[in-house]
């Protein structure tokens, strides 16, 4: 008897938001001192509420990697994130690159952020993402710190070659990097022995939407793996203050196609199935039949 084939269910991808304000971007650090942060116009509260409404419109849940610095100043914001069914995760306290810190300073940063986020939200914080994907071959001790601080997973490695970050030889998909700690890399598409970025951020604003959609679709259909997509709340904010004195390269990277970002995100939410990092990855890996890809 020939039974009718049941179409494969769409693979769920993880939607993630790095909760930081425009003036905290690493590329702006030479131009905006940390001592100035409290004097700058904050836009993050307004932008996150826009993101939350967008997600509600699409009945989508996501993971918010949030700075402790932001949470302290906007405690209701982290409560809103949790109350609306999203995952609250850590982006560290003060948006310092892991590669710029000592091991002791990094541990203190990620431990403090976890404590602040959990105390303010009442929710367990299981995940961490390093600012600017700043865990690489020279600071693999950061994983030891994360495990010691009680995190269950990290999403801090981008397996591409980039002038500010990247570990192109690292695994493309989730793997156990320390006992009890999973690294879930930012998604790439393997083409001609090279990893191409296919997971959001500036690349999503720069490349045609159809190309970004095709790359993520290939990861789902060919690799049969869930993708990790990320963006920042300032990327939908066309009215954010312009930072003076930055290089043309930095200006292009930060502002290119910001006016198109919200529309593209709405299309993306409709074109793929989405979920929280913990639901997409940790729940799947906890199942007896699950295996962790390492290639």
Image (cartoon, helix red, strand yellow):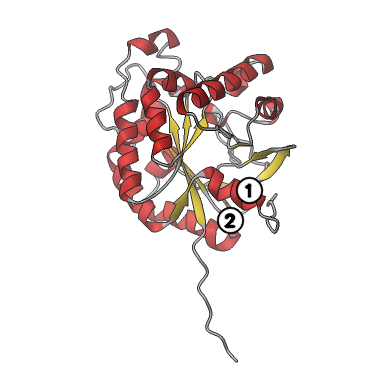
On screen, 182 above or below 107? Answer: below
Q: Residue at x 54, y 56 (%)?
A: 219
Q: Which image quadrant for residue 113?
A: top right
From the top left corner, tell me how far across and down residue 81 is, in percent.
40, 35
Left or right, residue 234 beside residue 89: left
Q: Which mark is residue 225?
A: 2
Asked whether 122 or 196 is in front, the reply is 122
Q: Residue at x 54, y 48 (%)?
A: 279
**Spatial CA span between label 2 and label 1:** 8 Å
Q: Residue at x 37, y 42 (%)?
A: 205
Left or right, residue 94 beside residue 269: right
Name the residue furthest right: 179
Q: Which image quadrant for residue 74?
A: top left
**Residue position for label 1:** 173
Asked whether 226 or 83 is in front, the reply is 83
Q: Crowding at label 1, few (<14), some or many (≥20) Cα neighbours within 10 Å?
A: many
Name the residue furthest top: 35
Query: Reading the chain from its start, which is encountered first: label 2 or label 1?
Result: 1
Name the residue furthest bottom: 1
Number of numbered discs overlaid on the protein picture: 2
On screen, 287 above or below 178? Answer: below
Q: Residue at x 46, y 23 (%)?
A: 120
Left or right, residue 82 beside residue 90: left
Secondary structure under tag 1 reads: loop
Secondary structure under tag 2 reads: loop
């Amino acid at each position: 008897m020939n039974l009718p084939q049941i179409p494969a269910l769409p693979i769920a991808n993880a939607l993630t938001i790095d909760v930081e304000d425009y003036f905290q971007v690493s590329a702006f650090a030479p131009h905006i001192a940390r001592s100035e942060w409290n004097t700058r116009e904050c836009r993050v509260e307004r932008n996150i509420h826009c993101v939350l409404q967008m997600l509600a419109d699409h009945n989508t849940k996501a993971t918010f990697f949030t700075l402790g610095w932001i949470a302290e100043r906007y405690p209701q914001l982290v409560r809103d994130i949790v109350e609306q069914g999203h995952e609250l995760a850590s982006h560290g306290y003060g948006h310092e690159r892991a590669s710029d810190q000592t091991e002791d300073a990094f541990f203190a940063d990620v431990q403090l952020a976890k404590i602040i986020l959990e105390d303010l939200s009442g929710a367990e914080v299981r995940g961490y993402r390093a600012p600017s994907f700043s865990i690489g071959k020279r600071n693999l001790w950061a994983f030891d710190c994360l495990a010691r601080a009680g995190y269950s997973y990290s999403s801090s490695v981008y397996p591409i070659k980039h002038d500010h970050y990247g570990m192109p030889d690292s695994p493309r998909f989730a793997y156990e990097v320390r006992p009890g700690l999973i690294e879930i890399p930012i998604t790439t598409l393997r083409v001609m022995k090279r990893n191409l970025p296919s997971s959001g951020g500036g690349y999503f604003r720069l490349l045609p939407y159809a190309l970004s959609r095709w790359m993520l679709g290939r990861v789902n259909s060919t690799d049969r793996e869930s993708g990790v997509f990320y963006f920042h709340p300032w990327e939908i904010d066309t009215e954010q203050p312009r930072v003076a004195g930055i290089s043309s390269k930095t200006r292009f990277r930060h502002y290119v196609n910001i006016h198109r970002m919200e529309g593209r995100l709405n299309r993306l939410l409709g074109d793929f199935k989405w979920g929280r990092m913990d639901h997409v990855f940790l729940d799947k890996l906890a199942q007896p039949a699950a295996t962790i890809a390492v290639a």
